[in-house]
Image (cartoon, rainbow, N blue to C red):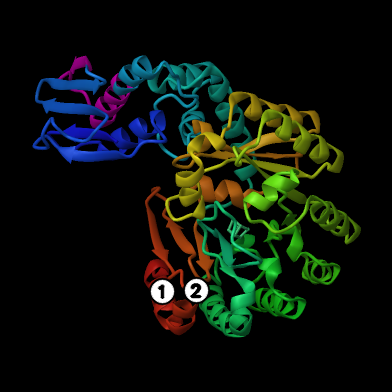
Amino acid sequence: MIRIKLNEENFQYDIHSLVKAFYPEQDVKLCGMEVSEASDADACLEVWYAPSGIELIWREDGTESRRTFCDTQDADRTETKNRLKRAIYGLLSESTGRVLPWGDLTGIRPTRIPMSLLEQGRSQEEIAAHMMETYLVSEEKTRLSIEIAQRERELLSPIHYAKGYSLYIGIPFCPTTCLYCSFTSYPIAKWQKRVGDYLTALEREMDFTADRCRNLCLDTVYIGGGTPTTLEPEALDRLLCAVEEKFNLRHLKEFTVESGRPDSITPEKLAVLKKHHVTRISINPQTMKEETLKVIGRCHTVSQTLEAYRMARDAGFDNINMDLIMGLPGETSEDVRHTLSIIEELRPDSLTVHSLAVKRASKLAQWMEENGRDALCNTPEMMMLTENSARRTGLFPYYLYRQKNMAGNFENVGYARPGKEGIYNILIMEEKQTIVACGAGSVSKRVYLDGRIERCENVKDVASFIERIDEMIERKRKLLED
Ligand code: SF4
């Protein structure tokens, strides 16, 4: 365990995230200075704030290193935070002998920095210097984030932030629960009898949303979850009929339905999606290694993925995304090469590469306790293999985000063929437009013109969502009132 002792409550979240990034396998605890030296901690970082500056002390294995810096009179909070993070980064980098690809950046949206600098009219060179000097980001990640920010700006240019909105609908059912899952997801077999009640509640929430947003232009619709295609064709048809009846889809730029689990896809369901003019679907292999699929509890085979993809192409889908995860249990660079060689043959229109993130709530956290963290290994080589493979097949990076506790401290990147990007994915990351979300566990975000953001959450539990639908609508009413 690593303790962080502070004499003031200042920047705790950033400090904690940075220490955790260097020591992902360790418990990192924040505490006050009163905690005694004779603790059970393996290492300790002390942060002493004083009016004149900040002193840092790092103790590990009987050794001690220090850093002190003075604050200038006119230093603002952001500048102080940046200097503090650079100093902590220096101490920990020296102690571990490691450098982090994203430097001392701990937020989940690193592209927002180049995006806001581009909006201010700064040149690529200036932005690169800022990323590398202020946040110690590697040259490679700096290049990637600037390229993505430029592409995002272009893709978002036809979107009217104030007069438009996007709609998310959550279907919280899956065939089984994946080892790493942290989403709102329940096994469909257990909940089949309540699907009708769930859709009834969802329709009431959609009714309210459609009415409340009737004067806004609906830009994108994203049906996710869970796995929406776990619904039987009739239920899927009912859901999509409701979307068509309630919302004005005339100006819609994109209509996505997650069909993530290949074992949930049938020609009948694809025909329903086509009938309702769904433009983009996602079929997610995660890996093309049979053995890993069993370990992660996906309960589908590689050949089911290939078959689902073929069915979707036969049904006429010309915008198919595939998700992969790097750092899955026991996977090596060779396994990644094998997966990518199959993906290159399939030629999906977009490819989203995730770095495995270990969430406390997932079964993976327990799995790691039993099998050790070493079995989850994501490397710069693997990330490079995916980037090279995507570019080789004409896919370019267009969105990026990070999560806590990611294998190798990397990122998730979406690659797409020009014209096949998922605009909703950028909107949710950049938080430029209001997204109204319906369904259990979904979170609506209202974005104001001055950049302020307000959120409201729906309960995660399906039974509670059905029973408390009036309360969910009331929450939305408050969020969306003028
Ligand atoms: S498919 Fe996605 S939502 Fe469903 S269990 Fe797996 S990770 Fe969770």
Image position of 213 with respect to 389: above or below: below
User: Which residue sits at x=15%, y=21%?
Assistant: 53
Q: Circle 1 is placed at which residue position?
A: 477
How far separated are the C-alphas under marks 2 and 1? 8 Å
Task: Give the mark nearest the N terminus, 2 or 1.
Answer: 2
Image position of 334 with respect to 274: above or below: above
Whether residue 287 is in magenta: the answer is no
The reply to whether the C-beta atoms of the residues labelled 2 and 1 are less than 8 Å apart is: yes
Residue, far front: 370
Q: Is residue 437 left or right of residue 96?
A: right
Image position of 247 with respect to 349: above or below: below
* SS for dot 2: helix
The three-letter code of the residue at mark 1 reads Arg
Image position of 138 with respect to 286: above or below: above
Q: How many marks?
A: 2
What is the x, y in percent for residue 383?
63, 29
Indicate which disc residue 139 carries. Answer: none
Q: Quarter for ligand 1?
A: bottom right
Query: Which stretch appears magenta?
Result: 63-87
Q: Split into 4 quadrants, where in the image is the C terminus?
A: bottom left
User: Which residue sits at x=63%, y=80%?
Assistant: 192
User: Which residue sits at x=26%, y=24%?
Assistant: 84
Q: Circle 2 is placed at which residue position?
A: 212
User: Which residue sits at x=13%, y=28%?
Assistant: 49
Q: Is residue 254 left or right of residue 463?
A: right
Whether residue 86 is in magenta: the answer is yes
Question: Which quarter of the picture shows residue 313?
Answer: bottom right
* SS for dot 1: helix
What is the x, y in percent for residue 47?
18, 28
The three-letter code of the residue at mark 2 reads Arg
Q: Split into 4 quadrants, where in the image is the N terminus?
A: top left
